[in-house]
Image (cartoon, coloured by chain):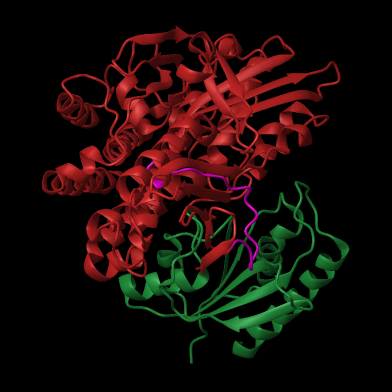
Amino acid sequence: MSKPKILIYGYGNPGRQDDGLGVLLADMIEEWKTQHKLENIFTDSNYQLNIEDAANIADNDIVIFADASQENIEDIDYTIVEPSAEINFTMHTCSPSFVLHLCKNIYDKIPKTYLLHIKGYEWELKEGLTNNAEKNLRKAFDFIVNKIQEYY
Amino acid sequence: MAQKITIEPVTRVEGHGKVTIHIDDNGQINQTRLHIVEFRGFERFVQGRPYWEAPVLVQRLCGICPVSHHLAAAKALDVIVGAGTGEGLTPTGEKMRRLMHYGQIFQSHSLHFFHLASPDLLFGVDADPAIRNVIGVALEHKDIAVQGVMMRKFGQEIIKATAGKKIHGTGAIPGGINKCLTIEERDSFLKGTDPMNIDKMIEWSHAALDLFKDYHKKNKDFIDNFSNFPSNHLSLVRKDGALDLYHGVLRAIDKDGNKILHDVDCQKYLDYIDEEVRSWSYMKFPYLKEYGKQNGWYTVGPLARMNTADFIPTPLAQKELEIFKAYTKGKPNHMSMHMHWARLIEILHSAEMMKELLNDPDIVNGENLVTKGNKTNEGIGLLEAPRGTLFHHYRINNNDQITMANLIVSTTNNNQPMNNAVEIVAKSYMTGQKEITEGMMNAVEVAIRAYDPCLSCATHALGKMPLEISIYDNNNNLIDRMKK
């Protein structure tokens, strides 16, 4: 059986402290999969999700979005993403569920999609993570590596 | 009963914006305000940093239009490193920057039209919000949604190829650029598999214009009269009066088309422009000094650019400009919904410009990328960002550290016209009404959305900023609240 195509897509702004957690995770996974010469694992990142990401996710079997979170979680949380047409409250970004719904409507494809929430703490104009966010990033990395290994 | 209505934050508008509308006991609108909590800490943040870091640092300011800030900062630093005030770069340096910029305009305007404006046009402003977005477009007009997605993607790929990467691009540096295109990159944009090539982008840009013009024919009353009010208009233009989104001189015209700012050097903008602070908004109100706070405010962005420019230096967009200008018999166009029309002409122009630049041999010539000269301690960089004129101004000390930064972003330039638009629409739709409907609320948002305001500070972590609409009575008691 062929191995599934997996996309790890981190989004956020690394210039705003912990807001860059998702992007840094994607960078770590890229380095890890290169070291291990794993095929069919792809990474991508951007400041935020947008409508063109419907095209970017369409050809994958599994998509894992990763984003910094201000929600009331301890460190990381992993949730399934269902397509949703619910509009976002901002003008220039889309939610993972919106991107997935657009992908379904345009390309008739629904990759299995998840969102990894990584708890962040500080959001100022600084490079670098807070200490607690660093720990959460390490947990997130271990978690995603385990997930990938389930398929390989 | 008198009411105070608050729309907070405005849907599909970046950042923290809220609208308050005060209605008196007779149902008359007596005050409207668009309040904006704009992020303003950035100018202090860059103080003390080495000047050459600025083009990368400024991308932290906004994750929506980082390329505009990247290029405006680089232009200001060109002056500081002695590379001239806009005309001193090497041919490859200038053309790569222009390609990056037109890629940015193309993808940003495409997002606005297909994701934000076309749903209002295709379904109406009072349609169910669940379908009044690109998902609704995809269900009813799949081909249009596909075009929007792929035009965004094309523009993003141009940015990635010219800036080096999607996040914190490094393509523009003081005095030039750090890479040219490879031949493979260039060819992929010129001859890529359908639809990812520049000819398809031009074709689709035309199709989007036709979609708008067709809608306009059928809905003249709405498009022409919704939020129509006189304004001054300001933008950069090329020295010969042509539309130029990357570089030029500052021109402003009054509501009748008379020049009131006569093609002045950007380096002298402080001689002509000032900013007013008002207690109820964090965003300043820029105005032309000569005409004062009351009469000197102006509009920037696509509509302003169509009004100030004498012509467009690409053939297809020029033909469209002629039609656009003929509609108002050569007089300035003040119709807010015509901003969509203007934006679509700029999409077409950007596509034409990208094709011209991609076909230019300098774009793959990696021999001469940076200009060097005698350093100065102050530089100003302006460009026409998707939403309008963007100002970056820096001073440095003898240790090469930034000591002062002043930024006037496009949305700030449009502060007064956006407030006027809210007032006009609120009066038109809400006066004398006993109930405030979702359609009325959206009409206010449509007026703001025409300006495509961007108030982002690029922090978007999950769980932030729900939409909340609150209605108060004349004693400021909350009588209703809606959350989205």
Residue A88 point in image, percent of width and height: 48, 64
**Image-quadrant location for residue B205:** top left
Q: Residue at x 34, y 32 (%)?
A: B359
Bounds of the magenta segment: B449-465
Tell me the chief SS of the magenta region.
Answer: loop
Residue drawn at (58%, 12%) of the image = B267
Could you tell me which residue is drawn at 69 percent across and 37 percent down?
B40
Q: Position of residue A91 (x, y in %)?
A: 47, 54
| Chain B tint in image | red
Q: Which residue is the extreme one toward the bottom?
A: A1
Can you give x and y, in whole percent of width and height, for residue B37 in the image?
A: 63, 44
Q: Quadrant of residue A47?
A: bottom right
Total numbered circles = 0
Please tell me whether residue B454 belongs to the stretch shown in magenta.
yes
Task: Examine the structure image and report whether residue B147 is included in the region drawn in magenta.
Answer: no
Chain A colour as displayed: green
Place of residue B480 in the rendered image (x, y in percent of width and height, measured from the top left): 51, 66
